[in-house]
Every structure is written in C-alpha cells, then in structure tokens.
Amino acid sequence: MSTDQTAARDAGAPSASLLESIQPVEGGREMHDPATGERVGRAPEAAVEDLDAAVARAVAAQPGWAAAGDDERRKAMHAAADAIEARAEELADLLSREQGKPLNGPNARFEVGACVAWLRATAEFSVEPEVIVDDGTDHAELHQRPLGVVGAIGPWNWPMMISVWQIAPSLRMGNSVVIKPSGYTPLSVLALVEVLNSALPADVLIAVPGRGDVGDRLSRHPDVAKIMFTGSTETGRSIVKAAGDTLKRLTMELGGNDAGIVLDDADPQAIAEDLFWGAFINTGQTCAAMKRLYVPDSLYDQVCEALVEVAKNAPMGVGREEQNVLGPLQNAVQRDIVARLVDEAKAAGARVLIGGEHDPEVPGYFYPTTLVADVDAENPLVTEEQFGPALPIIRYSDLEEAIEQANALEVGLGSSVWSADVDRARQVAARLEAGTTWINKHGAVDPRMPFGGAKQSGYGLEFGEHGLKEVSQPHLISW
Ligand code: NDP
C-alpha cells in the first residue's frame, strides 16, 4: 500500500477503496476538503498527449457500442445505475469531502441519487425514425445516428450529476464519451466514471483529469464531434472559438442570474421554504438557483421575515456532520466573490437581514447564509452572478417594472413566478426571457423536461428526447 493510501486510511476515509483505484501510483495533485482543509486524496493530472490517446481509444470503441443496439445500451445503462446504487454512500462521502457539500439535505446523497435517476430515465428514452413525408409519391424518414465521440467538460458545483447529464444521453445514442472534469473536483468525477465503467464496455467512457489546456484540446480535437459544456459564460466563449475550426456541434450550459418574482397574491408563509431552497440549494452554487428575488411592497416585510425564519433553521457546517444542510463554498475564489458582492451592497446602503459577515477565524471556505433587503436593482449583488449563499431581495411597487428588471440582464437560464393564481403566474411567466420559468418552485430540473439557456446562458437542450437529439446526427432518407 502506498503512503497516500495509508494516509487516506488514517484520516478515516470510508471511500478509501474507490480512492485507491483512482489515485495515481505517485505524483498528482493534493485535494482538500473545502470545509476543513483536511486532505482528501491525490488527483492524477493528465497532459494534452493523454487526451489525444484517450480520444483515439474512444474513436476505436465507438462503432462497436453503436452497433450493440438500443437494448444492449439500455441494459448497460441500467447496470451502471445499479453499480452507482451499490456504492452510493461511498460516492456521496467522497463528493462531500472534495466538493464540500453536506451529505444530507439536497446535497451529496441527493446528487448521487440524481445520477441514478437520470441514467435510468435516459436509458428509457428513445428517438424513433420520424416519417416526414409519405404522400404516395414521396417518402422521407428522419433517423438519428450517433455523432461519434462526444467531449464533456464540466464544472465543480454538481460534478457527478452534471457529468451524468452529459454522459447518459451521449451513451444512449451510441456515442463514446471523453470527459474532462473540473480541476476543483476531479476525484468525484473519476470515482463516478470508475463505477460506471464497471458496467460499460471498455473505452466507451474515458475520464481525462486535466486543467483548461486539456479542455481546450478536447474542444479543438479533430476526432471529437461534439462538446457538451457546463460552466462559465467566459469559458463557454473560448470553447465556441476553439471548436470553430472543426465545426463541432455544441451544447452550452452557461452561467445564469435567475430572477424570482413574487406576485401580490402569494402567501409568504406557504412559499418561504421553497423560495429559500430555490436560492440556497447547494449553498447557492447552482447554475439555475434563484439569484435575485423581486417582492411587491405589500408583501415585502412578510416575505423577508419568513425567509429569515427558514434561514435560521438551515444549519451550515462540515459536510459529514449529518445535521448540516448547507456547506462551505467550494473554493476561496468563489467565497471571495460572494463576500465582495455583499460588502458592496452593504456599502451602498442595503440592509442585511441575516449573515453578511465573513468570519476569517472560521476554517474552510464558509460564508454565512445571507439575506440582503432594500437593495437597489442596479447593485452588483443583483446584476452579477454571486453563485453562493447570499440572496438580494428587491422591492417593487409596479409588476411591469419587476418584469423589466428580471429581463434586463444578458443572461437567461431559469426564472420563477410565485402566486396563488397559476393562470396569472403563467401570464407573467410567458413574458420572462429564460430557458425555463417555474411556477411556485425554482430549479426543479426533471429528466423528462428539456433544460437549456436563453441569451448568454447558452444554447442547446439537455434531457428527454430533445436531449437525445442534441447528441445525434439527423439523417434523412428519402425515396
Ligand atoms: P469554468 O467555466 O471556469 O470551468 C468549467 C470547466 O471548463 C472546467 O472543467 C474547466 O477546467 C474548463 N475549462 C477552463 N478553461 C477552459 C478552456 N479554455 N477550454 C475548455 N475548457 C476549459 O467554470 P467554474 O467551474 O470554474 O465556475 C466559474 C463560474 O462559472 C461560476 O462562478 C459560475 O458563475 C459559473 N458556473 C456555471 C455553472 C452552470 O451550471 N451554468 C456551473 C458552474 C459554474 P479547470 O477547472 O480544470 O480549469
């Protein structure tokens, strides 16, 4: 046993055996728990040449996988879901320690469960050949073929679940996949891929843990047909440029700054819990979390008070302590972004209802659950994506103004409307510029419902039949 494996055992890590199989024999990069600074393990670091070798293997494996047929692929995906279920606690433990999110609440166990749910649901979707014309003279059918090798590039906030969102439809349609995890959470994705591969043929799924240069090479690689990317708008732009020379297909899930609008007929007590979790799921580090909340004058104080009550009862702390439902930020850069934005809002005269002070004595990258009232609609805490546990609550007196402000930003991933009258909420929803608008909930993704961004939040759809078509080559046959 290597020194590192011994150290992992000494730290009492229950996921040592998965860690043993994914850590390099020597070298690699030390990964630490964002909540405690404790060592988690060592992540291998691939170079650009390793990526090229992985793509070559994926190219070689893809035709056999495509030829295996729908039933075989469906079975393999269910077997992969079984394998995750069998090691769910081990995966959740590693995810909690590397990403920082608590085991409990809508966090690490929830994320591993979502991987299973998405694999099983995606296995059961299919796209049948579509008869386009059949008029006795002309006939045309539209088939969906595999593209070849799909490159997946993912973020650090939901590293396992978002990987499955990219992997599952690609595999289902007969593509092979080369995935590059975020440099912040490589172990989580390597462990997930290790478990998935116990049920898949060799080389149809390969993880290459490297940094941005490896992602860049994947985006340019002539043998990669498509990139599925989730991450920042800025990196998304680089990938679009890099992919241009080979005319790669792209699905871009980029940053958002989702607005929630409470209408004046809503019941503050009834919606408070869902409003809170719509914003604070994964400690606010969620692309489609609510990041600014517009509340009418008539309900403003009641909504603020109800949210403070929920916040007080949502413990934040170290991931493996079962009572916690909120955790640290995953990294110092993100923690500092949240702290800066809240400080700027305070300096501009906003009123902190709870939280709002980063305590440098607390170890780890924690920032307290923060609700900020009486904040100006143009304040950076409202107009920039905080991606953390700080929600600005903006007061409005005219609904038209709230709709205008909700639509004013360049991004448009999700949005939500909160009302006792669903028909009224639907009318407001129809006017919001976003890929999804939820009513009386926020961020409730579902494998059956297509999900994607508007404006600078990206393009392309994930999930369901629409998601399968995104990783397919349409092929019309006409006679
Ligand atoms: P990034 O866009 O920086 O990184 C996402 C992935 O892209 C990582 O795997 C990263 O690798 C990789 N990458 C970096 N540079 C390149 C490149 N030139 N070509 C190809 N791949 C590259 O996002 P982060 O995860 O660091 O998060 C930063 C911000 O992105 C957040 O603050 C948030 O605003 C937004 N975000 C949005 C998400 C969403 O779901 N829409 C999810 C997560 C973040 P590496 O990390 O190893 O450099």
Image (cartoon, grey):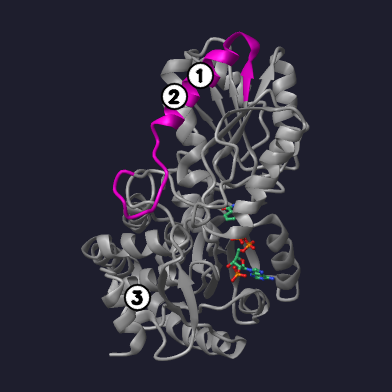
Res 138 visible: yes
Give me the C-alpha separation between circle 1 and circle 3.
46 Å
Of marks 2 and 3, the one in the foreground: 2
Q: Amino acid at mark 2?
A: Glu
Please name the residue that numbered disc 3 is placed on.
194
Foreground: 453 or 348?
348
Q: Amino acid at mark 3?
A: Glu
Give residue 372's position: percent from left, percent from top.
62, 30
Please name the residue that numbered disc 2 is placed on.
309
Question: Which image quarter is the C terminus in?
Answer: bottom right
Give residue 58's position: percent from left, percent from top.
48, 82
Does the magenta-highlighted stretch encompass residue 219? no
Work out whether 475 lies above or below 124: below
Q: Earlier in the sequence, mark 2 or mark 3?
A: 3
Foreground: 220 or 265?
265
Give residue 23's position: percent from left, percent from top.
39, 82
Question: Which image quarter is the N terminus in?
Answer: bottom left
- Whether the residues at callouts 2 and 1 have beta carbons within 8 Å, the answer is yes
Foreground: 414 or 211?
211
Please name the residue that numbered disc 1 is placed on.
305
Quarter of the figure with residue 151: bottom right
Q: Residue at x 41, y 67 (%)?
A: 38
Q: Residue at x 62, y 43 (%)?
A: 413
Helix, strand or loop at disc 2? helix
Label 3 CA crowd tier, 10 Å (few <14, some 14–19, many 20+): many
Write down the region rendered in magenta. Answer: 294-323
Give me the C-alpha separation between circle 2 and circle 3.
42 Å
Q: Residue at x 73, y 72 (%)?
A: 242
